[in-house]
Image: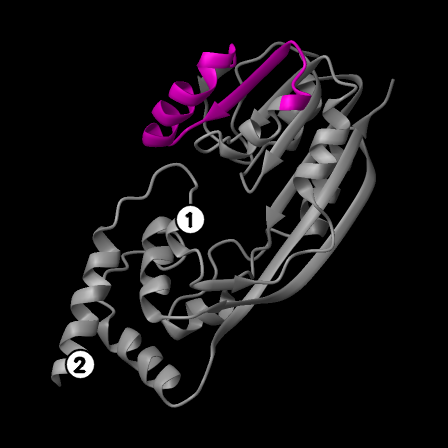
Amino acid sequence: MNRNRVDLVKSWKEEERFPFKGWDFSHLEGRIRTEDPPWDYLLLAGERMKSAQAVLDIATGGGEKLLELRKFWPEKVAATEEYRPNLRLSRERLELFGVEVLEAESSRISKLPFPDGEFDLILNRHGAFSSDEVARILRPGGVFLTQQVHGLHWDDLQAAFGVAPQWPDNTLDYYASALTTAGLRIVHGEDWSGHQEFLDVGAIVFTLMAAPWTVPGFSVDSHLETLCDLQTQQDEGGALVFHAANFLIEAKKSV
């Protein structure tokens, strides 16, 4: 391995060790270009929050996005999070403003620690959820708004590392059907597909450490050959561009 490549590997290992808190990708500012879907999730959430009395944010992460909506909060705001480091961080950030942050698993079958009909607005950005539980804790006339990462997001990046998507059925059709079965009416559903470009291989390393489910067991040492292949691709003029996909669903409970 030449000297330049030795220095690159050293920088990749620094990315591997770089601390990641909440869901904060500011470390990658200027190093990643992402096309945006045609909707603005935070704008939609804020508009719906204006008329809400009780709001829940499922899988709040470090509470970053919920805090961006602070000016729209009603009197009652609650959040859930299951990842312990993010749970601590979100409590530090949100409880200062009177938000109840509860530890709760986010999955398609997990129960939520709230009584029936507790909320008239439930938000969820990029977290798994149980359609039955969402329907149960929504008040009559309540709204559920979610933006999801499509199960085939980064499928070509995963293929480069020799792995397949873990949740290929995480789709608009799947959740629209599940929410309808749970008794909600789909007000709006929208798919989006675009691209995301990494401007250096180190940005890929940081991202895979921050989202370890993308390439399970990833490390610089264990996947060094693939990282070097990507570096060669970039050195030869090939952009590090990969598939990005999201979908949006707004559902409502009957009065």
Location of residue 90 by image quarter: top left
Instruction: Name the residue at 57% across, 12% down.
Output: 114
* SS of the residue under disc 1: helix
Q: In the figure, 160 relative to 35: above or below?
A: below
- Residue 221 screen position, x and y as percent: 17, 66
Q: Which mark is residue 57?
A: none
Location of residue 73 by image quarter: top right
- Residue 102 screen position, x and y as percent: 46, 17
Image check: 230 left or right of 76? left
Mark 2: few/some/many CA within 10 Å (<14, 14-19, 20+): few
- According to the image, label 1 marks what residue? 26
Give yes or no for residue 85 being in the magenta stretch. Answer: yes
Name the amino acid type tagged 1. Ser
Residue 10 seen in render: yes
Q: Which mark is residue 4?
A: 2
* SS of the residue under disc 2: helix
Name the amino acid type tagged 2. Asn
Location of residue 5 by image quarter: bottom left
Bounds of the magenta span?
A: 71-99
